[in-house]
Amino acid sequence: MKFSIKKFSIKKKIFLLTAALSLAFIIVSIAVSSVIFMLKTRNDTLNLCKTSSLKISGVIEDEFSDFFSEYKEKIDKIYRENMDKIDLILNDGTVSYEEKSKYFSEITEGVFPPRTGFGLSYQMAQFNNSRNEVLRYIDLISSSDGMIGGYVVYYDEENENSVFLFDSTPPSSRDYNFPASFEKVGTRLKNEVFCSEVSVAFYESDLFGGFSPIKTQDGEIVAYCACYYSINRLVNSQMEFVFTLVATMLVATALMLIVYLIFANKYIVKNIKSLSESAIEFTSRLTRGGTLEIIDTNVKSHDEIGALSENFRLLQERIIGYVGEISEKTATEERMRAELGIASKIQLESLPEKPLMCKNVRIESFIRPAKEVGGDLFDYFMIDENRLFFVIADVSGKGVPAALFMMRGKEIIRSCASRGMNVVEIAQTVNNELCKNNKEGLFITAFIAIYDVNTKILTYVRAGHEQPFILRGGKAEKISEESNFILGGFPNFTYVSDTVQLCGGDRMLLYTDGLNEGINASNEEFGYERIEKALEDSNGEVLTSLYGKLCEFCGEKEQFDDVTMLLIEVAKEDVITLSPPTYDDIPKITDRINSQLCGDGEKIAELDVIIDELINNYVSYAFDGVAEPRLEISLKVLGGEVKMTFTDNGAPFDPIKSPDADVDVDVSQRKIGGLGIMIVKNISDGIEYSDAGGLNRLTVHKKIK
């Protein structure tokens, strides 16, 4: 489980923070106090060592100066006479303490009396008493000051030895330094002690030491008194101090933590919890809806939390006010959106909904407004049985004003076209009408055209509109290099028409600038070249495919302008005559027809099956006894549908009424015939038969898109 302090309550966070700060405070306090205690204790101990040694040297100088001089001379004589032997005894690890004690007793026999004390002269007894008094003072002063012990040495500068005279350590101790024994003097003692005329204190290894010189009445230094103190004893004192400090700090911290938590709970946690509960309740009411009212936080403090509570109250008041305003605005916007939806529906319903097909031409439309209502318009209808009228236009501006201006322009255009005006008359009339009462300065770009289905001639006026594309033989190119002025610019403008001859299979694309000026995130326009390529690559639904390419190009970029397109398609027509038809004609005919088709490969393959089955039937059954058999196949391709009419001069026969083959009967028992016609009926999208003046006429419909 992943640990996260973020999930803790404020109370827990305060507790953890207090505990952490207290622990840190304890650690720092212990560390600082220990260092201070150690430094102070060390300095005090050094001063104490120095003071103790100074006391001892003072006693010796004041009360035992004559004795000390005599005693030092005797020990020095023994030391110098036995130096080599003493050195050997002291440094030989095989010599026992008893052997050392015996040896030093022997060499000092003339100085110290026998242990029995019998037979002493008055002078020897007095000398021995003085020696014992010195040892007693050394032990008394050092022990009273807490020292481990004390001793007196003099410095043999010639041999760099410190020679022991007195040692307060009991003679039975193995740490006892016998009179006349010596040690090599280290550099520190030599430089700091035996070269100093004043008392010196220092620590080395595991001992603190204080040295004071013993001087004669003439001020000559004859020896040094030393007192020493164990560092282990100091460490023990420090540990006792630390343990006491830790215990005290822990108790104090626990009490502080309890008091702090009580304070934090009463004045912080409780108020914050009250604020949180009030915020949750207010948010819940805001989410559920209904009437909002201010939630009292019950915070009585006058600190920052009190200020926060007051600000929260002000926030509630403002939110309640904002919610009221937003509700009112939302209701207004919903009403406007509903009205715009109705307007959009009315606008779109005023435009042709379905493609129009008449004789050899088909026209279909596509529109995607950028807003609820748009400024693009189009219209198409048959003026009479031979003339198709169509128009596409784009109003300047966006939104409702453009939509209203568009509706006005559309009705004027439709009215003029319905009255039989030519394209020039329509353009001029619409222009003059739009110039009236046009204070907003709106205008329309338009492409107005009339197509003659017999001559296949398209007459048009391009009034500032985008150039159309014609897709012919798989190649797309723009037409109409010259343009007239816009509609609604200024009155009485003279418009000029132009014509273009359309051929079977031609497709003309008309569009508004929302297509070519569509931009992507890099502010690049879709452009004419992409329109051209999309047309040439199209296979099937041209308009939806073209809009899909635009959307793919624009990506996340919002559609800025209305996109409207018209596609005018002229039928492909072909007539194939077979006199007489043969089986060998089948692949030739299918190849010839397939070369003129563009659509779904599977559906085109089904069309090939239809052709194969019908020609097989004609060759096998239709022309028995006919002197000059003749079959004519009329082909018409328009709007993704193939219409084939088979006309023959064979025996009268209606294949629609002929019974289907019984596929449930075994092949060996099934009657010959009927299977091919049944296949044609099943895979075609419509089949018709008529008797045309002694000729059989069979029409088959097949959708290939």
Image (cartoon, rainbow, N blue to C red):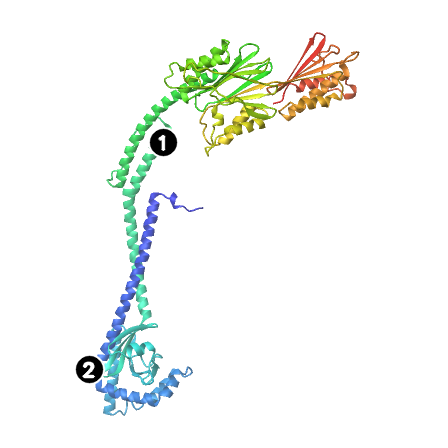
Which label's residue is closer to the chain start, 2 or 1? 2
Quadrant of residue 184 within the rendered picture: bottom left
Q: Nearer the viewer, residue 332 or 461?
A: 461
Name the side, left or right, on which 411 lies relative to 324: right
Q: Nearer the viewer, residue 147 or 357?
A: 357
- Callouts 2 and 1 close, C-beta under 8 Å: no
Question: Residue 668: image x %, image y %?
Answer: 79, 21
Q: Nearer the viewer, residue 425 or 659?
A: 425
Question: Residue 202: image x %, image y %?
Answer: 29, 73
Q: Nearer the viewer, residue 683 or 553?
A: 553
Q: Secondary structure at mark 2?
A: helix
Q: Who's the residue at 32% across and 60% down the image?
A: 31
Location of mark 1 (residue): 284
Does 155 sit above or below residue 24? below
Q: Secondary structure at mark 1?
A: helix
Q: Residues within 10 Å of mark 2 (few under 14, many from 20)?
A: few
Does 203 sit above or below residue 262? below
Q: Label 2 vs label 1: CA separation?
A: 97 Å
Location of mark 2 (residue): 62
